[in-house]
Amino acid sequence: AGSRLAYCFFRLPLSSLDFTFRPARQVIWVDTLGQTLSSQASLISAVKSLDLLLGFTVGKASDNTRTRWGRRKPFIAVAFPLALLAFFLFVNAPSVGLGLARAKPRPPPCTHLVLNTSSPAGCPALKDCLERAMQQGEIDRFDFTSPSRVASLQSGGWQLSFWFALLYATYLACAYTCSQIPYDALGMELTDSYDERSSLFGLKTLFQFVGYAATPLLNIGLSALLADDLVALYSMLALAVGSLAVLAWASLLCNVVERPPPPEDHTILPVPIVPSARRVLANKPYLVYLLMKMPLSLVSLMPSNLAALWVKHNMALEAWNSMYNAVLMFALVGAMASIGVLVRSAQQYGKAAVLQAVLLECDEAQYRAAQLSAARCGALLWLLPLATGAPVERLGGTPSG
């Protein structure tokens, strides 16, 4: 029981790290350091393309590894601390420097009037001061950013891109490829019993959703104290999540014992790559499944990656971070509440029919979300995450599994 719990517990910080790392790209690198969204998107695409090739190498190397500690745990023991180091530097980039030091900006105009708004004349005076500053070009209007100010914000140049690519690639490779691939394989090898394996992965899924839910809740709690300093907020969040990850990593290494791999059968010759590929191409149902996985992967990534941009820019909220995390919580509620319904529906109507219905509902929900403006959203702001979260989190699970 202790070994199973230690194995499943490791999944919790993996989820928490993910929900801290994603919004940090916007909060730390775009808003604070001035990286452009186009530059960031290009670097992410390049890094993930290289990481795709690395995944095959890590899987093969893990299968062929033979040590007294097993063949999966050595990868986790070495790679996960490197992932945590990259994670900490990524989230704390403005604090640790990394060649990204920026000139201290001048204090904005009218700040001396902010503390005087309690008097009857305070607010009109502040309003007049801000309007004069806009007319004189000292500050931009709320709905406009001057090209010169954009250029000053985007002055990081190649150094900013270099450090982002390096830290993002290190975290992605060490946390997901070199740690999670052996971790998932380790779970499959802990027991041969179908019932025990189902129970194990059910408990693992529970820890996964707890990790996803804990991060937005902690973020909302910290927002009550640090709403005006998101850099400090994410620094504290990274410290809390990172400490939990170290505890889970140590627990996994100390309490989970790998079973010895099955003896090699030298009478079975390996299949060459060309015949193996031809067999895959001849399997039409499997090809259809692979073709479906590509758009499904894109669709499942869109809500969580675009939610921060939608809440901040479309809704034009100053305290957007709290709203973003509240939206994530509602999406998780929709995802978790849908599991039982989808399982029963798949059993009654068939997996293909349920998957078609889920895809149509998800497409409609995301289309409606893209068409909404802040003035028209109203209660739909809370209903859409419920509707989108339910199918998106289960696209690759119950109906298609």
Image: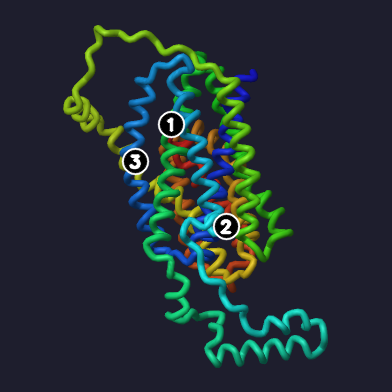
The residue wearing badge 3 is 52
Q: Position of residue 74 (x, y in %)?
A: 46, 25
Mark 2 or mark 1: name the one nearer the start of the chain.
Answer: 2
> Residue at point 25% right, 33% down?
284
What's the distance in space between the residues labelled 2 and 1, CA to CA? 32 Å
Q: Closest to the observer: 280 or 163? A: 163
The quarter of the picture where the C terminus appears is: top left
The residue wearing badge 2 is 95
The residue wearing badge 1 is 181
Q: Give the crowd class for mark 1: few <14, some 14-19, many >=20 residues within 10 Å.
A: some
Q: Closest to the observer: 213 or 232? A: 232
Query: Under tag 1, what secondary structure?
Result: helix
Q: Position of residue 11 (x, y in %)?
A: 56, 34
What's the distance in space between the residues labelled 1 and 3, CA to CA? 12 Å
- Residue 258 showing in the rendered view: yes
Mark 2 belongs to which amino acid? Answer: Ser
Q: Position of residue 276 (x, y in %)?
A: 21, 26
Q: Give the crowd class for mark 2: few <14, some 14-19, many >=20 residues within 10 Å.
A: few
